[in-house]
Image (spheres, rainbow, N blue to C red):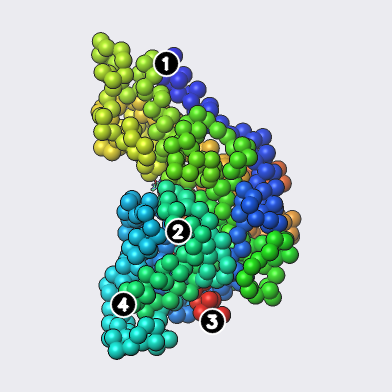
């Protein structure tokens, strides 16, 4: 079998037809509604306790930290009260060993230390005057209330939220695994380490990044169109949307403002299909899942988000190149015919190591429209240590990568389309536009990711081309930082 034919066979395995798309939307709606009625379903549908959205007039300086996956971000946000804001931030990579640390304290002490470093760098005056005052008294009495920064803690893992600044970790995702933290209040874990360092900071709100994205969008586009949904397509994937409280029939354990009749729901859609077996599955999806830290769970996320797409492509490409019949990444002039002696792939190549292929490389492949695919061939030499890849090699890689991401985008449309249908807004003549805020490197940087989502939305029954025209998917930049600050402000008003 020639390389082109072999490639087509692999690509075909990632097909996701319109019929399957619609079947998935039905199943998603079923699970979404089951999650509003009871706990323990495939979509957790977690009440956020956020019952109002900002209108753009909010003012003040707030801290926000974001533990989202690859990085930890600390920022301060000045809300100017006119839909604009100024944001200063530091970003550090989470050391891999802390993602699987023995105790929660190891990770949270690291996070508190980053907050201290940020305050020393960007708010030195405030930090030192507060620290000076405190030196004569014990915490927290040593601080005046206005010296204490309210902090919104964006924590993008499944938590059972018990109040605006209280929530227990349900499970880790995205490669984190610190069993000791599961079941604990993550705000308290962070506050304890902040207090140990004596910082003038109060963890005021626990924020899911998708809820934050939705809030930030409302602040910045106040007076125009209220967003229905905030969605993330980065290391992981998740979405939060506005639901009628009357539809949330399961118990909501903490206090909340009942006057609005609405509450933001964090769907935790990354776990859609846990144990239901409806999602499209190739042998490479199975291998990825088996070799992951959490086999059998986060099945939707494992087909949709940045952390996993590169790995699916890598596994498929590995099988293709190790097939002795295949010419992929081979020196075809060699007199040998086994893979080990004819391969152009360095033993150190990321193609040969788990997680060795960053999803960013898939974006490079998709963006390369040069006739000789010279950009992706260069990228393979530089970052993947494949020596002198041929045009055919690059074509095969580009085709497989494109197929994996296209399936991901169509699966993304399953969640987005289902939430739009759930809202009933398509049938409401008053709603001329349904706004959706999205964030994350995959949707931001992968060429035409949103176009592929729109194409799929048009094929969903009940949406169709006219419905898809009413849906506006816009990038919500810096959403989690600003959104977390806004929720910290709302929480402060409730103190
Ligand atoms: P996080 O979700 O951790 O807050 P990001 O939104 O930046 O951060 O997402 C990081 C994920 O996006 C990683 O899995 C990475 O592989 C992927 N990624 C980074 N750059 C790109 C890119 N240019 N195209 C596609 N995916 C990317």
Q: Sequence-wise, which precedes: disc 2 or disc 1?
A: 1
Q: CA distance from mark 4 to mark 2?
A: 31 Å
Disc number for residue 495: 3
Q: Nearer the viewer, mark 1 or mark 4?
A: 4
Disc 3 vs disc 4: which is toward the camera? 3
Q: Which residue is mark 1?
A: 2
| Cα–Cα gap, marks 2 and 3 | 27 Å
First in sequence: mark 3 vs mark 4: 4
The circle drawn on residue 109 is none
Q: Is residue 56 above or below residue 226?
A: below
- Give the quarter of the figure containing the N terminus: top left
| Residue annotated with mark 2 | 181
Give the answer, above or below, for where 151 lies relative to 327.
Answer: below
Across and down, in percent, residue 480 comes to: 46, 63
Q: Residue at x 40, y 60 (%)?
A: 104
Q: CA distance from mark 2 to mark 1?
A: 51 Å
Q: Which callout, 4 or 2, points at the residue further toward the start of the chain?
A: 4
Residue at 26% x, 18% y: name it.
Answer: 341
């Amino acid at each position: 079998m020639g390389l082109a034919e072999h490639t087509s066979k692999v690509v075909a395995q990632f097909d996701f037809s319109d019929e399957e798309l619609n079947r998935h939307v039905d199943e998603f709606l079923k699970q979404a509604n089951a999650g509003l009625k009871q706990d323990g379903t495939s979509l957790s549908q977690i009440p956020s306790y956020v019952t109002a959205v900002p209108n753009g007039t909010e003012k003040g300086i707030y801290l926000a930290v974001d533990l989202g996956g690859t990085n930890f971000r600390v920022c301060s946000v000045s809300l100017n009260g006119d839909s604009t804001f100024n944001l200063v931030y530091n970003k550090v990579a989470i050391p891999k060993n802390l993602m699987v640390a023995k105790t929660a304290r190891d990770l949270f002490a690291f996070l508190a230390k980053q907050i201290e470093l940020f305050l020393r760098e960007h708010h030195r005056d405030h930090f030192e005057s507060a620290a000076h005052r405190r030196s004569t008294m014990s915490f927290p009495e040593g601080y005046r209330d206005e010296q204490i920064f309210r902090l919104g803690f964006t924590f993008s893992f499944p938590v059972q939220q018990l109040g605006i600044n209280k929530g227990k970790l349900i499970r880790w995702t995205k490669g984190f695994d610190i069993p000791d933290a599961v079941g604990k209040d993550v705000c308290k874990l962070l506050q304890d380490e902040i207090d140990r360092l004596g910082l003038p900071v109060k963890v005021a709100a626990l924020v899911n990044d998708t809820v934050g994205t939705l809030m930030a969008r409302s602040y910045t586009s106040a007076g125009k169109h209220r967003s229905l949904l905030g969605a993330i397509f980065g290391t992981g994937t998740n979405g939060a949307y506005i639901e009628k409280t009357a539809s949330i029939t399961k118990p909501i354990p903490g206090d909340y403002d009942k006057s609005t009749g609405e509450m933001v729901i964090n769907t935790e859609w990354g776990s859609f299909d846990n144990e239901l077996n409806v999602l499209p599955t190739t042998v490479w999806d199975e291998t990825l899942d088996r070799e992951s830290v959490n086999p059998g769970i986060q099945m939707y996320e494992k087909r949709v988000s940045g952390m996993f797409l590169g790995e699916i492509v890598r596994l498929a490409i590995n099988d293709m190149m190790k097939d002795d019949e295949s010419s992929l990444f081979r020196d075809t002039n060699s007199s040998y015919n086994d893979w080990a002696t004819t391969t152009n792939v360095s033993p150190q190549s990321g193609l040969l190591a788990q997680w060795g292929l960053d999803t960013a490389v898939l974006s490079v492949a998709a963006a390369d429209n040069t006739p000789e695919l010279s950009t992706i061939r260069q990228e393979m030499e530089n970052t993947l240590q494949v020596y002198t890849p041929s045009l055919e090699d690059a074509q095969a890689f580009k085709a497989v990568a494109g197929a994996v991401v296209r399936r991901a985008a169509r699966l993304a449309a399953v969640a987005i389309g289902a939430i739009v249908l759930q809202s009933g807004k398509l049938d409401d003549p008053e709603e001329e536009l349904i706004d959706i805020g999205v964030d994350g490197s995959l949707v931001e940087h992968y060429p035409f990711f949103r176009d592929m989502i729109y194409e799929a939305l048009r094929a969903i029954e009940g949406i169709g081309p006219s419905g898809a025209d009413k849906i506006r998917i816009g990038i919500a930049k810096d959403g989690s930082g600003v959104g977390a600050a806004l929720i910290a402000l709302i929480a402060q008003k409730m103190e």
